[in-house]
Image (cartoon, rainbow, N blue to C red):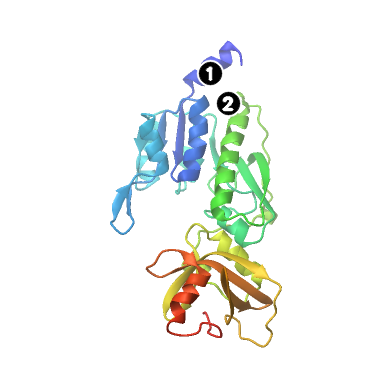
Amino acid sequence: MNIEQINIQKDLKIIYMGTPEFSATVLSGLLSKYKVRAVVTQPDRPSGRGEVVKYSPVKQMALDNVLLTLQPEKIKDSIDEILALEPDLIITCAYGQILPKALLDYPRLGCINVHASLLPKLRGGAPIHRAIMNGFKETGITIMYMDEKMDAGDIIAQKKIEIANDDTTETLHDKLSVLGKDLLLEVLPSIIEGTNSRLKQNEFDATYGFIIKKEDEKINFSKTKREIYNQIRGLNSYPGAYFNYDNKIVKVWDSYQTDNVYSNLVDGTVTKIYPDGIGVKVSNGEIVLKTVQPEGKKKMSGHDFANGIASKENLVGKIFI
């Protein structure tokens, strides 16, 4: 990097927008190489049983680095405040709001986004969950220019990563956040110099990774064991897959598939209590629920859950719905 490039970088006005832990990891990489003029993140929200207000990971990192921090309820209400900072570049990563056109059009270097999928696959707010739930073998990071449509802008760069058979959303999240941090730092010099690649997305290939809804969490034991296995790990560590038993919700955090077949049983029937879990009949065989969490209780092994019920009844033959 020559003296001219260093001066350009020094005077560069970057605004970063993001909220969760994923975004904080990317921000940490950015701060290691560049000055950030301001951070925009979602407003503080009460969380947990005590309704304690907790800062977002991005806000906490901004405070730790003494950065100007904006938290508009609606981004459109803070357009003038943001434009007054005269950003040369706006970088977003899991911010949680769509940027209005006035912001998209202002920075001379554009608005870019760090997205956790290989666009145009899995546009939307839950691409990591959906990649695992949909049984993808690989996913990745896309750095893209933003436009008025959701995750539909031109692609600057992509990097792939394999999804391991035992990956959960939590483990894949951590891998992708580091990949996103590294890829952003790799492509930023070319964006600043105006030499980066720019590839239009093929709309015919677009799919969507929409935010998880309550109906996505409910286990349907009439599905295949692979589909259920993917659902359970795709919802781990948040919000968790679940079934109903005795009119109560039981979340499932870990499972494995067997080769056993029980064609004479109804889907959802408890087949066997294993040393490490509860066998349940599904459409094409059996899945063993290893780690469960009954409503109002801590996580426990499926075996311990069965033992707790055994004082009242034998769980084998009962049906989970």
282 above or below 137?
Answer: below
* 16 lies left or right of 228: left
| The furthest residue to the bottom | 264
Identity of the residue drawn at 60% across and 13% down: 2
Q: Position of residue 282 (x, y in %)?
A: 63, 77
- Report the disc number at residue 55: none
Observer-nearest residue: 245 or 51?
245
Question: In the picture, residue 19 is in which quadrant?
Answer: top left
Q: CA distance from mark 1 to mark 2?
A: 8 Å
Q: Position of residue 262 (x, y in %)?
A: 67, 82
How crowded is the residue under tag 1: few (<14 C-alpha within 10 Å), some, or many (20+)? few
The amino acid beneath tag 1 is Ile
Dot 2 lies on which element?
A: helix
Name the quadrant of the N terminus: top right
How crowded is the residue under tag 2: few (<14 C-alpha within 10 Å), some, or many (20+)? some
Identity of the residue drawn at 58% across and 56% down: 168
Q: Is residue 200 visible?
A: no
Identity of the residue drawn at 57% across and 60% down: 234
- Report the disc number at residue 192: 2
Observer-nearest residue: 8 or 99?
8
Find disc 1 in the rendering and name its residue: 8
- Looking at the image, is mark 1 or mark 2 earlier in the sequence? 1
* 204 lies left or right of 188: right
Observer-nearest residue: 175 or 119?
175
Find out whether the residues at labels 1 and 2 contact each other: C-beta distance under 8 Å.
yes
Question: In the picture, residue 223 is in which quadrant?
Answer: bottom right
Dot 1 lies on which element?
A: helix
The amino acid beneath tag 2 is Ile
242 above or below 100?
Answer: below
